[in-house]
Image (cartoon, rainbow, N blue to C red):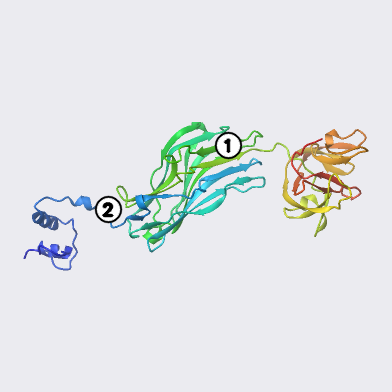
Amino acid sequence: MPLQSSGAISLNQIHVEAGGTSGTQASINDADIRGLISKASGAQMSFSEWYGASSFSWTSPSGGISYSPTAAFNIEEENREGNQAKARTRINITWNSNGTHTTSYTDLANEYPGDSVYGAGTNAGGNIVTSTNTVSILEARFVFVDVDVDFQTATSDEKVGITYIPGGSIATTNVTVRNNTQNDATDLDFTDSWRTITPAVMGGNGSNTQSFDVFTQAESTASSGDGCVISTSDDTNDYVGLEIRANGAGGPTMLLRSSTTTGVFIESQCSEIPEFTCIMPDMIVLEKSKGYIRIGDVVVGDRILAKGDLNDSTVASTYAEVTEARTHTRSGYWNVDGLHITNDHPVWLTDESSSAWVKVEDMRDEITRNYVAGTVDPVYLGTTPGHYYVYPVDKSQKFTVSGNYAPTTE
């Protein structure tokens, strides 16, 4: 009996009409079913066109493009201790079971003492919506369009990179987009390979909360330092973006990209201060709650006694907050009336007519001092007023020393 000429027709009805038993397994690609459809339509049909087909689609935002907040993709990182300086923008996606998925953009930097970080923070992004969570595979890839790369010193540790962090049992993937051996680039175009990221909520092995980074990196032990910058000049047409594809080649895609109005500026700078001015760890300071303690035992956040006003002796002493505390290897130190200090560390000295910061090596000849050779690990302390009191081990004297690196010496 022929199938009806109108209304819904099920695959089971086609299967039975082609000679099969009702309720038994059938495929739209079975030869008998293909033949019956071909007779009904009057034209041969290629069922390979159905491969990968699904009801999945990106229903929001319009046009399949989600633009980042204007504050995103804009961060600078500076490290002054020879550690790695790495500035990055992270795209965060949370995949939800209801088809409404949240996105945000986080600007991040390594955090070492001495870092200066500009632009760090998290900004909510425009959310994306799908018609269904049923996919065979979800993939992602980074795309750079007309991006400028500037390797400012071109050392071996400068690079631009991307990182995929799908979570779950899917491994993190790091990719170098460009390094210093390839030199600077103007209007760089780069398209990465597709990377599987299918989250658990869509039947995959990835986490439902995923992250994707684009970063610059620099690392140098030279005082001149090095740096790496990526930027876009034509903000409308130039961008960095994360493209997401459903169901493989030909499947619907979504692009999460930088703003059209502010573009991209991600910079890393790294240098090593050649010699920190330091005090030997056995010297003494007076901490507000701990009493007299060794400089080697001071930690950030301690409050140590300091001169109230360098130029006014009538101002009472105050407790200065310690903002930096770290060791640095030096080749020897000076013993100045019991004060163990490096040659270039300024001490506040007063004579009959004036007061000034004076390095040990520049002190008057009548000040007794002698050099002690050998590798040592003195301590550098930074304080809020830029100075503090130091006592020799026997606390017989009190010195005001600098709590800033390389202050002006007068």
**Quadrant showing the C terminus:** top right
**In this view of the protein, can residue 343 be seen by the observer?**
yes
Which of 239/156 is in front?
239
For the residues bearing labels 2 and 1, Cβ distance under 8 angstroms: no
Which of 163/254 is in front?
254
Question: Is residue 206 positioned above or below 88 on the image?
Answer: below
- Mark 2: few/some/many CA within 10 Å (<14, 14-19, 20+): some
- Mark 1: few/some/many CA within 10 Å (<14, 14-19, 20+): many
Q: Which mark is residue 124?
A: none
Residue occupied by mark 2: 52
**In this view of the protein, can residue 167 be seen by the observer?**
no
Q: Position of residue 293 (x, y in %)?
A: 82, 54
Quadrant hosting residue 38: bottom left
**Which three-letter amino acid code belongs to the residue tagged 2?**
Gly
Label 1, secondary structure: give it.
strand
Which of 60/383 is in front?
60
**Which three-letter amino acid code belongs to the residue tagged 1?**
Gly
Residue occupied by mark 1: 227
Q: Position of residue 323 (x, y in %)?
A: 72, 50
Q: Position of residue 53 (x, y in %)?
A: 26, 54
Residue 367 in the figure: left or right of residue 65: right
**CA distance separating discs 2 and 1:** 46 Å
Farthest left residue?
A: 1
**Quadrant showing the N terminus:** bottom left
> Which residue is drawn at the image coordinates 8% and 55% (left, top)?
39
Q: Nearer the viewer, mark 2 or mark 1?
A: 1
> Which residue is drawn at the image coordinates 7% and 63% (left, top)?
2
Q: Position of residue 155 (x, y in %)?
A: 57, 33
